[in-house]
Amino acid sequence: MADKKAQLIIEGAAPVELPVLTGTVGPDVIDVRSLTSTGHFTFDPGFMSTASCESKITYIDGDKGILLHRGYPIEQLAEKSDYLETCYLLLNGELPTAEQKAQFVSTIKNHTIVHEQLKTFLNGFRRDAHPMAVMCGIVGALSAFYHDSLDINNPQHREISAHRLIAKMPTIAAMVYKYSMGQPIMYPRNDLSYSENFLHMMFNTPAEVKPISPVLANAMDRIFILHADHEQNASTSTVRLAGSTGANPFACIAAGIAALWGPAHGGANEAVLTMLDEIGDVSNIEKFLAKAKDKNDPFKLMGFGHRVYKNFDPRAKVMKKTCDEVLGELGINDPQLELAMKLEEIALKDPYFAERNLYPNVDFYSGIILKAIGIPTSMFTVIFAMSRTVGWISHWKEMIASGQKIGRPRQLYTGYAKRDLPR
Ligand code: SDX
C-alpha cells in the first residue's frame, strides 16, 4: 500500500521521508509512525486530519454523501436488507447465504434473554433516571455475568460476546423503558423478528399482548439499519481505544454508550425534538437560525452539520423518505415534521449554512419517526445505541484481530517547565 513518499522538511533538521499509504477508495494517508525518531509529534486535537486505524468495515465519502457498509450502499441495504442481515455483513464482511442467515437469526434469538439477576440492577436507579444513564450501568455490568467469554484473544469468545450484545441490547433497552414507566418487564419472544420483538417488549404488557404493526416493525428495522455503523465516529473510536487496553467487550460497549450520549453525537436526535419544541412555529425559525449563527450563542441547529459529510447525509435522505411513508401509512399529520421540513428548506438557502456545507444529518428526521412509533424522546439515544452496538463490536473485533497496540496519544505540553517547591 506504500508506493508513494512524502517529504517533511523541518527547519534545522534533515528532511524526513514518510510513506504515503493508499486504500481501496478515499484519501491517501501519510504514515507518521516513524516521526517520533525526529523528536516531533503530529498535533491534531479532534482528529480533524487523522486516520486512527485501517478498517474494511465502512466507507464514507463526505463530499459525495456516500456511505458503504462492506462496499454496499446504505440506500440499498435500507431498501432491500434487514437489520440482522446487515449485522452479519458488518461482523463477517460478506452477506450471509440463506442458511447462514437462518443460523445467525436463530443464534441471536437464543441470546435475547438476560440473566434474571440483572433486573435487580434497575432498582438502584430512580424511575426518572435518564435511560442512557441506566444503559451505561447495566451494559457495563454484563461483564459480571459472562466470565465464560471474556478472553478477548479467543475468537470464539469474541464471537459469542458479539452475539450476546446484539441480542440483549433490545431486551435491556425495553427493560429500562418499562422500569421508567413502572410497568412489568416483558420477556423476549422467539416467534417474533428482531424489530417486532423490540416493539413487543416496549409496548405490550402482561395484561394485553397486541400484534405488532408491520409498518412500525419495518420502520424500526430501517432505523436500526441506518444507525448500524459509521466508521471512526466518536463513540466507535472510544470503543476501539477502550478495547486496545484489553478491556472486555461489555465494558468497551458501555464506554461507547457513554460517548454516544453527548448532544454533539448520538444525543442529537433527542436534542432535535427539544429544539423543534422550542422553535414551536414556523414564524420563529428565523430567530433560531440567527441564534445558530451567533458565535456568542452556544445554540447549534441540532441535526445539522457533520464532521465528515459536507453534502447530504445519505441516511438523512432515507430517513426523510421513511418519515413520509410511516406518517402517511399511519395517517399522522405531525406538525413537527412540517416544521422540520420548513426549517431545512430555510436553512439550506441561508448563506451561513451553505458556505459551511451544513446539511441535515441522520438525527434530523429520526426523532420524528421514533415519535410516530411511540418511543419517548428520552429513549431516542438508547435506540441509537442499540443500533450502533453491531458497529461498535465489529470495529472492536477488527481492532483486536489486527493486533493493534494500546492507543496512547501524546500531547503538546504548554504548562510550567520544572520548578521547585517554594519551601
Ligand atoms: C452524529 O461522526 C459521526 O459519524 C457521527 C454520526 C454517527 O453516525 O456516528 O454521524 C452521528 O453524531 C451526527 C451529528 C449529530 N450532531 C448534531 O446534529 C449536533 C449539531 N451539529 C454540530 O454540533 C456539528 O455540526 C458537529 C459536531 C456534528 C460537527 O462539528 P465539527 O465537524 O467540529 O464542525 P465545526 O464545529 O468545526 O463546524 C464548522 C463550522 C463552525 O463555524 P465556523 O467556526 O466555521 O464559523 O460550522 C458551524 C461551526 O460553528 N456549525 C454549526 C453547526 N454545525 C457546525 N453552526 C450552527 N449549527 C450547527 N449545527
Image (cartoon, rainbow, N blue to C red):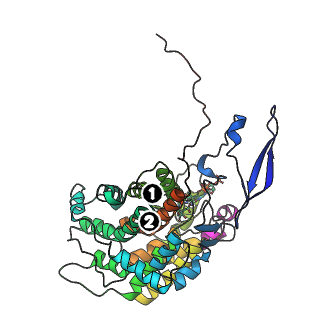
Q: Depth check: give the residue in front, 239 or 129.
A: 239
Q: Quadrant of residue 101?
A: bottom left
Counting residues from the start of the chain, the first of labels 2 and 1 encountered is 1
- Residue 403 position, x and y percent, is 55, 54
Q: Does the segment drawn in magenta span residue 161?
A: no
Residue 331 visible here = no
Classify mark 1: helix, strand or loop. helix
Rate crowding at label 1 as few (under 14), some (14 to 19) or many (20 or more) other CA atoms within 10 Å.
many
Marks counted in the figure total: 2
Q: Which residue is mark 2?
A: 389
Residue stretch in magenta: 345-358
Q: Is residue 367 visible?
A: yes
Spot the residue most to the left: 207
Is 390 left or right of 290, judged from the image as shown? left
Badge 2 vs badge 1, beta-carbon distance below 8 Å:
yes
Q: Is mark 2 within 8 Å of ligand 1?
A: no
